[in-house]
Image (cartoon, rainbow, N blue to C red):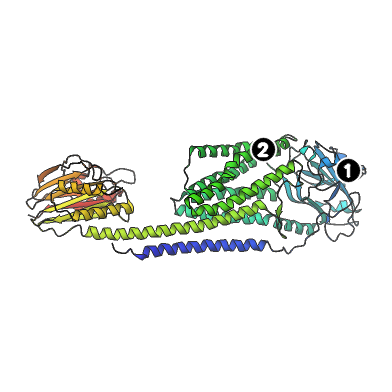
Amino acid sequence: MPRSSPVPRLQAGAAARRLNCSLLCSLACWLLLSASFCLPAHAREFDTHPPLDPHSVDGSSLGGPVDLSSTWLLQQGDDPVYAGPGLDDSHWLVVRAGRPLSSYGLKNVDVVWYRTHVHLPPHQRDLALLFERFVGSQQTYVNGVQVGSSGPYPSGGSLTASSVQQLAIPDALLADGQLTVAIRAPIGRASDHGGTPAAFDIPSTLLLGPAPLLAQRASLFYFRDYTSNVTNITFQALVLLIALALALTLRTEREYLALAILLGGAASHDALNLWEHARNIQPTDPLILLQAVLGTIRPLAGLEFVRLVLGLRRTRLLAAYEWVLGFFGIVVASLFVHLILLGPPGAGNPLLLGGNLLFEAVSLPASAGLPLVALWAWWKRRNPDALLLFVPLLIDALVGYISFGCYLLYRLHLISQPGIGVVPLRSLFVGWDEVTTFIFCVALLLFLVLRTLRIARARAQAVAEIAAAQTVQQVLLARASEPTPGFAVESVYHPHSEVGGDFFLVSPAPDGSLTAIVGDVSGKGLLAAMRVSMILGVLRREDSREPAAILTRLNEALLTQSEMGFTTACCVHLHHTGHYTVANAGHLSPYVGGVEVRTPAALPLGLDAGQAYETVSGTLLAGETLVLLSDGVVEARSRQGELYGFDRLSALTRRPAQEIAGTARSFGQEDDITVLTIACLA
């Protein structure tokens, strides 16, 4: 066998290297960009929650914002007079940020009011209040005048956090320099039975200061809070585009499509969540349902992605679990979130812990099972992609369980924070879940690089092997037709792909007769080409000129080969006088003068060792042509799905071989087409 041409291998290898370089460059750019986010931000920083006396906060030297967050006067209940500046609040509780209401003897609180008094130089102008991470809804009053609010009223259950909100203070309220800031905060009855922090929680902030300076602070807040979110969303979108391009290019590799769906759902979910928080969008039922649908796409697509990468079957048990996960993630989750955020006062708190426990139990097979399955596939099957997926899957599961454990401890009042906090960076607020998302995206990008490179190499090798097989097949078929004195022989061969499964052989004998055979092997591609090469080698060593004997020996040769499939063939022995003998093994019968030569039925070659092949005889008259062809002619199919069929074959076989094959190809080639015509010259 001649050495395969290196050109296809080099072309495919060059394409793989270009793709590899582009993916690695994208990864390097994103790593550098993310590293730049960890540098100190060139913006003014402020002290966090300095101690103050809410009865009299000194703001006389207003060189910067005054932080009102640490200590407040608090009164439970709901009375509009609590907003007025002349109210005597000396008997109100003095509470500190972060301490639960139960520590002050308050439980089952529905609404609380916060008040503080600030002394400023008279006739100040252009001042504002800036809320950061205020949890729940609020109505804010300055000297009895409402200057802003967030959230629906009256409040239902617990509401989402208001990320940042700047409220302008009318200059008329600043004339005498005495400000009374009052905040009405509905927090829901039975809120943690007193476990809700009094005043502001530790991350919450309320600043009083010049509006331009607070606008700068708001910009800094957006940068510090949302840079990591935007980075992850953009990174997810980048990997999504790469996965989608690979899914469209490598259509047989369905894991790329599953990955594209996973990333599309995750990026859309994170982008919608970021939009809601950045714009202080209050929850509604359509938004809750949309969040639930997008949030469920990631685990479902993740299950299919890991399954396809590891080559696992989609069992009925897995399919049932995916249905259960989808039902809980969309229907049950939407109902829980509706009750928690929009339900009757206090309804969310009893459901919150039970809902979290339920969802952790339902998602346990996915969150904890996928890393274990990946580790098993790497250990048992030596799957190179399994280990690459195991690391981010394990990190994601561990962070999720640690976060849920902290939440349980917080609910039991054993720790003061409900989560695991943020990554200790100087200039950014980055949650650990965002870190795991970034690690997962990096691992996916490496996965795409390595897997695509491996597929490109495998396909380059396959292309080279097919090119070598095509060269061998062309050489063999070119030698399949020798000079045939006394006969006019015309042969046409059009493979459907690079290499075909049809074969033919024309061999003249010393007595002036001619033996011809046309056949078709089962299967396609490289394996079919190898069978054709073996069959032509057997036929060339055949000494007999009897069609039945030739087919019998070829049948025996095929039966000695394992996994060779079956082969159909029709063999003809033709004398110069025009007398012919035909034996057929499951192939199309020959045509003489446009009339089919009926041959006895027989099994194809390579199926039964005891199969006998009977012969029929006849004579070519002057001007008649014997036609042997493969089923690619009758199985030609038009764009409308119509088969060429046998009804048109009688008239078609009266034409030359080139015209027969050309007609089938123009009608719609679906298989290899082989046509062999023989006529006696005398």
Is residue 594 visible in the rendered image? The answer is no
Question: Dot 2, how many residues are within 10 Å of its Cα: few (below 14), some (14-19), or many (20+)?
Answer: some
Percent coordinates x, y for residue 647 in the rendering: 22, 41
Q: How many marks?
A: 2
Comparing labels 1 and 2, the label whose residue is closer to the camera: 2
In this rendering, position of residue 598 left or right of residue 219: left
User: What kind of element bears circle 1?
Assistant: strand
**Viewer-closest of 440 and 590:** 440
Residue 314 in the figure: left or right of residue 677 = right
Label 1 Cα crowd, 10 Å radius (few <14 / some 14-19 / many 20+): some
Q: Secondary structure at mark 2?
A: helix
Contact (Cβ within 8 Å) of mark 1 with mark 2:
no
191 horizontally vs 375: left or right: right
Residue at 65 percent of width and 46 percent of height: 401
Q: Amino acid at mark 1?
A: Leu
Q: Which residue is mark 1?
A: 93
Q: Position of residue 232 (x, y in %)?
A: 62, 55
- Identify whether 460 is placed above or below 70: below
Residue pointed to by mark 2: 355
**Residue 192 visible somewhere in the drawing:** yes
Looking at the rendered image, the quarter that the C terminus falls into is bottom left
Q: Quadrant of the N terminus?
A: bottom left
Q: Residue at x 87, y 52 (%)?
A: 172
Tell me what residue is drawn at x 19 percent, y 48 percent.
553
